[in-house]
Image (spheres, grey):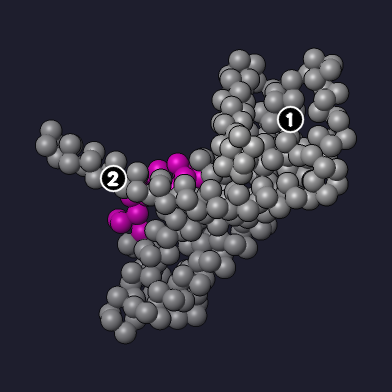
Amino acid sequence: MNGPLFRILAAVGEYFILIVSVIGVTLRRPPAWVLIRDQLYSIGVMSLPVVAITGFSTGMVLAAQAYFQLSDKGLASATGLMVAKAMLVELGPVLTAFMVTGRVGAAMCAELGTMRVTEQIDAMRSMAVNPLRYLVAPRFIAGTIMMPLLTVFSSIMGVFGGYFIAVGYYHMSRSSFLDPLPIHVTTFDFISGMVKAFVFGMIIVTISCYKGMTTHGGAAGVGKSTTNSVVICYSVILIVNFLLTLGLNSSYTYLTQVMSKWF
């Protein structure tokens, strides 16, 4: 019973136990505000430059491709709508999650992994300090709060980048780019992006912390755990994004049909 499949299932079980334990610890007695504040700054404020660059450049690429593909078909006015929809619903949450994983998730795993191999976490337990409340819960709270905010910021920067290319380079009129946005960008699009960002924040923090707190093997083990945590986060984010897209779209279709029958 020590084969690869058994180890994978055991790791998945330990991971979900960690999630439940962190949520329970957070609800019973939230960690100190100073710990949450530091993580909010580290995850949110310090990630703004890389998120801004990612969102802005992605918006420029989307606008350039959309205008190039649609202009000869008389649909160039849909450029702004395509950029806004893509950034808010799909690319904004996913690319922001990728950037936060690379900048914050890897650092979390390396920090906790170093504490694990140097027995600092064991020392905390010996002093009756709960490592989940002190180390994981502040990161969990900050990650789930900041990821939606960073996604909104990334989407805004993407629309601005698309506007810069479409209006400044391709000489579209401002009204053609901006007027369709308040009409066709719906509340459901915003909710979809925020739900994905919230889930991605949970995934990044919990996987990174789990891999860090289960590190073994000294300095080499820390490097291996950090690499594995980033790869796992990327893979899980892509899979969960697909599942959330199907689930949210199906839920929206179902609710629309139900409301049309009643109203």
Q: Which residue carries the number 1 mark?
A: 135
The answer to which of 165 and 238 lies nearer the viewer is 238
In the visual, does 235 lie left or right of 100?
Answer: left
The image's mark for residue 160 is: none
Q: Which residues are magenta?
A: 181-197
The N terminus: image quadrant = top right
Residue 42 image point, x, y percent: 72, 43
The secondary structure type at the circle numbered 2 is helix
Q: Which residue carries the number 2 mark?
A: 250
The answer to which of 257 and 172 lies nearer the viewer is 257
- Extreme residue toward the front, this view: 1
- Residue 148 shows in the view: no
Q: Which residue is painted at 81% across and 34% down in the image?
A: 116
Residue 55 image point, x, y percent: 56, 61
Which image quadrant is residue 37 in?
top right
Q: Amino acid at mark 2?
A: Ser
